[in-house]
Amino acid sequence: MTGGARLAWICGGLLLLLAAVVLGSLLVGAAPVAPATVFDLITGRGPGQGTERTVVLSIRLPRIAAALLAGGALAVAGAGFQALTRNPLAEPSILGVSGGAAFGVVLGQVSGLGQGIVEALGLTALGFAGALVAGVAVYLIASSADGLPVHTLLLAGVIVGIFFSAAITVLISIVDTNRLGGVIHWLLGSVAPIPPGSLGVFALATAVGLWLVLGQARALNLLALGDEGALELGVDALGVKRRIFAGAALLTGTVVAFVGPIGFVGLIVPQALRMLLGPDNRVLVPAALLAGGAFLLAADTLARSVVAPAELSVGVLTSFCGAPVFIWLLRSRIGRTAP
Amino acid sequence: MTGLPRALALCLLLVPGSAPALTVMDQTGRALDLPAAPRRIVSLVPGVTEILFAIGAQDALVGVTDFCDYPAAARRKARVGDMLAPNLETLVSLKPDLVVATRSGNREETFDQLKRLGLPVYLVDEPPSIAGVLRLVGGLGQLTGRQDAAAAVTAGLERRIASVRERVADRPRPRVLYVLWPEPLIVPGRGSLISELIASAGGESVTADQAQGYPRMSLEAAVGRAPEVIILARHGGGTGPAAREQWRRLESLPAIRSGRLYAADGDLLHRYGPRVADGLELLARLIHPEAFR
């Protein structure tokens, strides 16, 4: 099979999976809405007003859109960071990049940025800036003469993450204990219905980030050969790295601005896909986009139905799934590199 | 007086802990032995601060929390910090002879610390209800020797509460969603004061069936109960207006379509204090405006 055909098959399969998850998510929820009513409402034939319309069109649908965007963006950001650092454990939350983004966003929140479109842009910009600062800091701390050693990189990420979470605590304590509960809830990472205008900003910023990373999938493969190898094949390694880094940071900052720092999606999804599909980034990155969306949407659907009528924060669920995967990867990697 | 009885009397006075001058029951039914009626009270509960002012016992109040903002004179009392983490040094330096506290809002660690410092703690907790608030007013009146003033306050509150109940009786009871906190969504459940206030104001709280006092609920579950009136609690931080937009977007909802999205001062409704009648009247006016024309 040619590369193009294989990619088409894989994406086709993932799209089907995605459609199934979306369908399930539309039908499941704390409020009882008959499947037939859901279909009528989605196809524009349903009742023009009423509670069911609100539940399906104003609550479930925007939440599904937000989960898809966030999941796809996080998985692509994870795949990007992993290729960039040549380290399968790299992921926005582990690298401290989410923490930096969260600091930027909390800074915006405590200074009174609310829910409008302009505010959404402002929060995204702050999240992006925070992600950039954290990412650069981790890189500077961890880089040495022989590149980016795995353990140093992880430790640097953890330390930067701790630093920013302390900074967030300081910000909240200074400003207003009344907001503490809200910010803590947001820090757990929850997908909530986002107003249409802000959702547009979310989609646009995500699209720019995806363009930056997806366009470099071939160059990412060559980077796996090492900088010299890539250079021999005509790849401007530094330029590619900068572009991927900016893209992944933008994706992370955007997701954090809209749904909070949801961890481990960028780890689990690319990892599972690498096992299934192999390491070719030209397949892996687009597949991560679709599978990440499906994964986070499935997790969020679970989060809002398992303890209904209450609900869990989706970040809690992804961490539950992600932590064991991370431990397993770490152990198997140590096993391999042990003398 | 002869020598022996005098010596005996002196001994009695010197034996520590013997024959306390005053034994009071706090609202949890615990007996507190106090050497004398308290003259220097620290209140760790905003509602208690309000009650002490309402019954004219404010002179016996020497310290309050940062949240004790009513009446205005309460702000001039010495502050010991917030409810969760009062500053013990500040508290002790006020030389209190009694600390009034609550299990819902203060922490067990604080009670332990106060116990180690030998400070008696009067707990105000009992299952929350309007009747419980009235009993608390009476209890604090007894504690501070202001029984008559407390009885007058209680009678006034009872009168106003009965008057509201009368006005809304026999009217249809709209489904009311009360939002304590928007993100995450926290609502009043069974056995919370607000649920009883909503019922007394002639409404039917759509979340009153929840077992916990203040459960977290998904937006969908709350909206799925088709509320006809939505009341958003405003807190000190002024989180009301921002959350209002979020609700207004749910335009297909009965409450939003008929323009029945309101904000209410949470301090009137969440505090177990003398303004509970104001809270009830406010709720009744929002739920049954026609009854107050």
Image (cartoon, coloured by chain):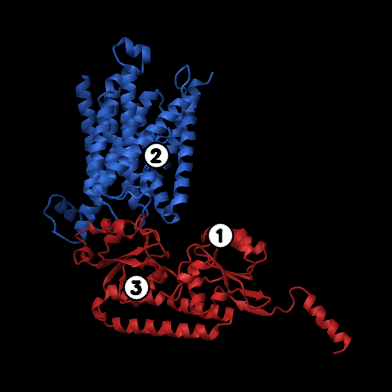
Chain colours: A blue, B red
Q: Residue at x 62, y 65 (%)?
A: B94
Q: Closest to the observer: B262 or A302?
A: B262
Relative vertical location of residue A40 with respect to residue B170 in this rendering, above or below: above
Relative vertical location of residue A48 with respect to residue A91 in this rendering, above or below: below
Question: Which amino acid, mark 1?
Answer: Pro
Look at the numbered disc 3 and give the secondary structure of its residue: helix
Q: Which mark is residue B86?
A: 1
Q: Residue furthest top?
A: A232
Question: What residue would you read off at disc 3?
Answer: B198
Question: Which amino acid, mark 2?
Answer: Gly
Chain under numbered label 2: A
Relative vertical location of residue B149 with respect to residue A31 in this rendering, above or below: below
Report x, y in % for residue A270. Answer: 34, 30
Label 3 vs label 1: CA separation?
Answer: 32 Å
Question: What residue would you read off at disc 2?
Answer: A263
Chain under numbered label 3: B
Look at the numbered disc 2 and give the secondary structure of its residue: loop
Q: Closest to the observer: A228 or A221?
A: A228
Instruction: Count all numbered tags in the image, as a single digit.
Output: 3
Q: Closest to the observer: B160 or A314?
A: B160
Report x, y in % for residue A51. Answer: 21, 61
Label 2 vs label 1: CA separation?
Answer: 35 Å
Lateral position of residue B82 relative to residue B173, left or right: right
Report x, y in % for residue A295. Answer: 31, 39
Instruction: Check contact, mark 2 vs mark 1: CB within 8 A.
Output: no
Foreground tag (2 vs 1): 1
Relative vertical location of residue A314 with respect to residue B288 in this rendering, above or below: above
Q: Which mark is residue A300?
A: none
Question: Which amino acid, mark 3?
Answer: Ile
Chain under numbered label 1: B
Report x, y in % for residue A40. Answer: 14, 53
